[in-house]
Image (cartoon, coloured by chain):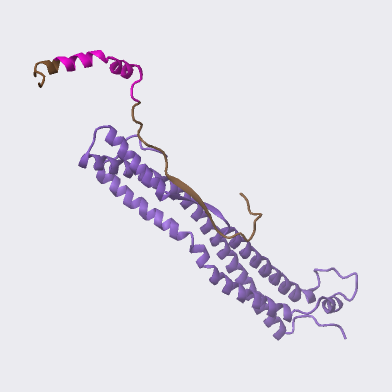
Chain colours: A purple, B brown
Amino acid sequence: MDDLSEPLGDKSSALLLGMFQDFYRQDVAAEEDVHRTLPFFATALGLIVAALNYVAGQLPPLSPVVKACWPQPSTAPLANACAWPAIAAALLLAAEAVLAVCVLWQLAAATRKRRYQRVGPETSQLRRAQDLQAYHVSMGLEADALDVAVAADLKQRLLADFAKVTAANRRVTQERYAGRARAVSFLLWSLLFGILATMFVVASAKLDLLPKAAP
Amino acid sequence: MTPKPSSMPQSISTERSGTPRVADTKSANPQPRPVKPAGSLTYTITKGANAFPSFKK
């Protein structure tokens, strides 16, 4: 969108300009939103790593499990109920770890470099105002009429520019927010699998379900 | 010895009529019509982290 073909009136352009400026400021502030939530993700990932560490420490090593659950090579691998508690705990643990990596991936995507648009720079706007004033002087305007004409042209220019850059900035902000939302989803699933893995391992240990090495 | 007032207009009239080039020049090279400044006044900046440079859309 460039110059408006039909310039708006003073009141309607002032109304729109105020609204566009609010949206512009919101998008400029939103740029840092994702970065400000990173400490939350760091804390949650710390909990996930702690759960991973605990559950992995409780799992029996692979060799005793194989010896205890598959004493004969002919035994079907997954038909043996003896190995299921260990297999289930390992799967939950793996899911938790993979989802934690997905959290980091999505956060990296959400915070990556992006191109934003700005209104300005100020020197160009000042020069534009001076050029407009010279133009209207050459058209014979002076005093108050000159000022009104320059202000009206500047307002139309700002309206078009704010409309253009705010739409582009909002698109970038939405991409960042979408990446962060996906990171939150992965984080919650990772936490869920971490809690399940911890509960499963604790319960299995209490009920003596985890296989031990054959004597 | 000031000239008569009546001689002044005559003299001026002679000078003006003797320099018709000004009018001819104007008609041959008219002043360009002033152009209203237009065009977008925006610029682009890049912001964000660079943890994974391979991310490209």
Which corner quadrant of the image does residue B9 belong to?
top left
Residue B9 visible in the shown view: yes
Residue, far front: B1
Residue drawn at point x = 25 percent, y = 46 percent: A11
Foreground residue, A139 or A179? A139
Residue drawn at point x = 71 percent, y = 81 percent: A204
Image height check: is B19 above or below A82? above
Percent of width and height locating residue A189: 60, 67
- Residue A92 relative to residue A189: left or right: right
Magenta: main secondary structure: helix
Percent of width and height locating residue B10: 15, 14
Residue drawn at point x = 55 percent, y = 65 percent: A184
Q: Which residues are magenta?
A: B10-31
- Residue A196 relative to residue A120: left or right: right
Q: Which quarter of the rendered picture does the C terminus of chain A lie within?
A: bottom right
Percent of width and height locating residue A127: 38, 44
Residue, far right: A73
Percent of width and height locating residue A16: 32, 48
Q: Which quarter of the rendered picture does the N terminus of chain A lie within?
A: top left
- Count the marks: 0
Residue A156 visible in the shown view: no
Foreground residue, A112 or A158? A158
Residue drawn at point x = 36 percent, y = 20 percent: B29
Which corner quadrant of the image does residue A81 belong to?
bottom right
Image height check: is A111 above or below A146? below
Asked whether residue B26 is drawn in magenta, I would say yes
- Residue A142 relative to residue A159: left or right: left
Image height check: is A190 above or below A205? above
Which corner quadrant of the image does residue A154 belong to?
top left
Foreground residue, B8 or B44? B8
